[in-house]
Amino acid sequence: MEFDPRNNVIKLCVQGMDMERKGKPDEARRIFLQAWNEATNDFERFTAAYYVARHQKNVRDKLKWLETSN
């Protein structure tokens, strides 16, 4: 699997990871959800759902997103 740095969803996920690194989880969560909403194919949906799952507050929701990513 190759990540295209020009892909908008990948760009958003990178921005979200940067917000995580900066200690801004709410901003990261918002960006990952934006990536999910802008995803147009299975690869983009898989990638975005993985990152959205990381920001769920309970196990049930995290599992839902992880299942969505498959």
Image (cartoon, grey):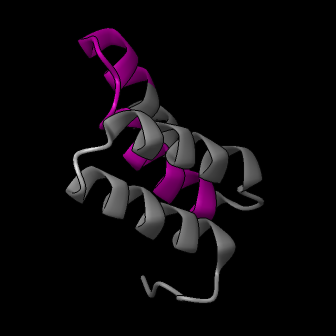
Chief SS of the magenta region: helix
Residue 42 x, y percent position in the rendering: 64, 58
Residue at image position (75%, 54%) is 38
Q: What stretch is highlighted in magenta?
A: 43-64
For the question of whether residue 19 can be seen, the reply is yes
Place of residue 44 in the rendered image (x, y in percent of width and height, measured from the top left): 61, 62
In front here: 34 or 26?
26
Q: If the image is split into quadrants, where does the N terminus sit?
A: bottom left
Tell me if residue 67 comes above or below residue 64 in the rendering. below
Q: In this rendering, is residue 60 above or below 56? A: above
Query: x and y percent of residue 67 in the render?
Result: 43, 32
Tell me how many marks there are.
0
The answer to whether residue 70 of the structure is visible from this angle is: no
Tell me which residue sits at (39%, 47%) in the image: 51
Q: In this view, does 42 lie to the left or right of 47?
A: right
- Residue 34: horizontal and vertical position, in percent? 65, 46
Q: Is residue 59 magenta?
A: yes
Depth order, front residue of 26/53: 26
Instruction: Determine the residue positioned at 51% across, 35% down.
Output: 68
Indicate whether 26 appears above or below 27: above
Magenta stretch encompasses residue 55: yes
Q: Is residue 22 left or right of residue 2?
A: left
Asked if residue 27 is positioned above or below residue 9 in the image, the reply reads: above
Left/right placement of residue 6 relative to residue 47 reads right
